[in-house]
Amino acid sequence: MIRASIVGGAGYAGGELIRLLHSHPEVEIGQITSRSRAGKFIHSSNPNLRKLLTKKFCSPDELTGCDVLFLCLPHGVAMKSIDHYMSLAPKIIDLSADFRLDSDLGYEVAYGKPHLRPELLQTFTYGIAELHRDRIATSDYVSCAGCNATAVILALLPIIQSCSVNSIVAEVKVGSSEAGSQSSEGSHHPVRSGAVRSYRPTGHRHVAEMKQALNIGAVSFSATSIEMVRGIVATCHVFSEQTLPKERDLWKAYNLAYLNEPFVRVVKDRSGIHRYPEPKQLAGTNFCDVGFERDADNNRIVAISALDNLMKGAAGQAVQNLNIMIGISERIGLEFAGLYPA
Amino acid sequence: MAAECPVCVNEIDFEDDTIVGELLACPFCGTELEVVNLGPPTLEVAPELDEDWGQ
């Protein structure tokens, strides 16, 4: 049994992580910290766990040793105390952006401030299993990918691996939980309800991850928040100056990339009402559904993906990485198939 | 016995009693397919709009 503790458990990703680890057969939850909720029951911030988990949040100052430490802290916070966390646990899984990028220069460009521990950037493995499974398996320090980055990377991966690409325009539509558990003027219900808000048409921080993970020079990325709590749907327009691959060649590329992946499914049906990936029925699951369509008139491939930003885009991805790191089936603790209708 | 889906190129296993003319759905891409040959096993996309096809 692995003893796992969570730093920063009162946020949405931390809450999902508690839910997943609570029912994980190979994990015993140790401590769950929250500076703002220390001494309060977990269900004070996660009412879905009432009567399931009687633990209370503790102060970060009370944190003691464990086998695996999950860091669910705001960006820029984990790296300030990373030496302390490394002294408490031999394995760390960081859900923030602090150790996703390989270079401190790239970090400074993306996040607008210098990295505090650039010498550790190479110590962490970027935690998308579909890219780096072997490295994750032998790594003690894993940095989970951003939710939008995960959606775009998994949508594009088969095409990048198999086609000559000229340019990429990626657009995500996202739910309100991406903004985190802290309320703001913009999340006030009369303002947020029904809004379709272009919140980051350019300059999103996750672009740096996409370029690094896919080894591409550029991706034109925009994000729009819509009337949805959980979920992302990514629509990626891939343009080529060469002749487009035939449909069956694209299928081969997707099959090669994902046929044996436990959490990526190709959704491209010729009939029915769910022909392409949709985030709605993925809520609470660790699946990323991907699909594609050819547009020969415009020499374009449209690559589509959908996932739950708090699951495959955060906590589910973290548990999948844990399973890989400790050498058990990736599916353990992540078997939930979702609800339909949701 | 198995054949390649002409759409998604995944391999589809046949039941032992599969016959020519039988319709099946690809478990990978959902396409309606027709078994057009058993030696070698061959599938084609089933016509969707022919009114008297297969009836």
Image: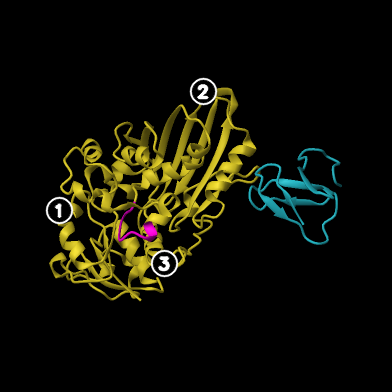
Chain colours: A yellow, B cyan
Work out whether residue B44 or residue B46 is closer to the camera in this orientation and state it: B44
Chain bearing tag 1 is A
Measured in 3D between alpha carbons, the distance from the residue under mark 3 to the one under mark 1, in whole angstroms, is 30 Å
Which residue is painted at 30% across and 43% down in the image?
A190
Mark 1 or mark 2, which is nearer the start of the sequence? 1
What is the x, y in percent for residue A270?
A: 65, 42
User: Circle 1: is it few (<14), some (14-19), or many (20+) Cα within 10 Å?
Assistant: few
Measured in 3D between alpha carbons, the distance from the residue under mark 2 to the one under mark 3, in whole angstroms, is 43 Å
Residue A327 is labelled as 3
Chain bearing tag 3 is A
The amino acid at mark 2 is Glu
Which span is picked out in magenta?
A136-144
Q: Which residue is mark 2?
A: A241
What is the x, y in percent for residue A111?
A: 22, 40
Q: Are marks 2 and 3 on the same chain?
A: yes
Work out whether residue A169 or residue B48 is closer to the camera in this orientation and state it: A169
Q: Which residue is mark 1?
A: A80
Height in image: B38 above or below B15? above
The amino acid at mark 1 is Lys
Mark 1 or mark 3, which is nearer the start of the sequence? 1
Q: Secondary structure at mark 2?
A: loop
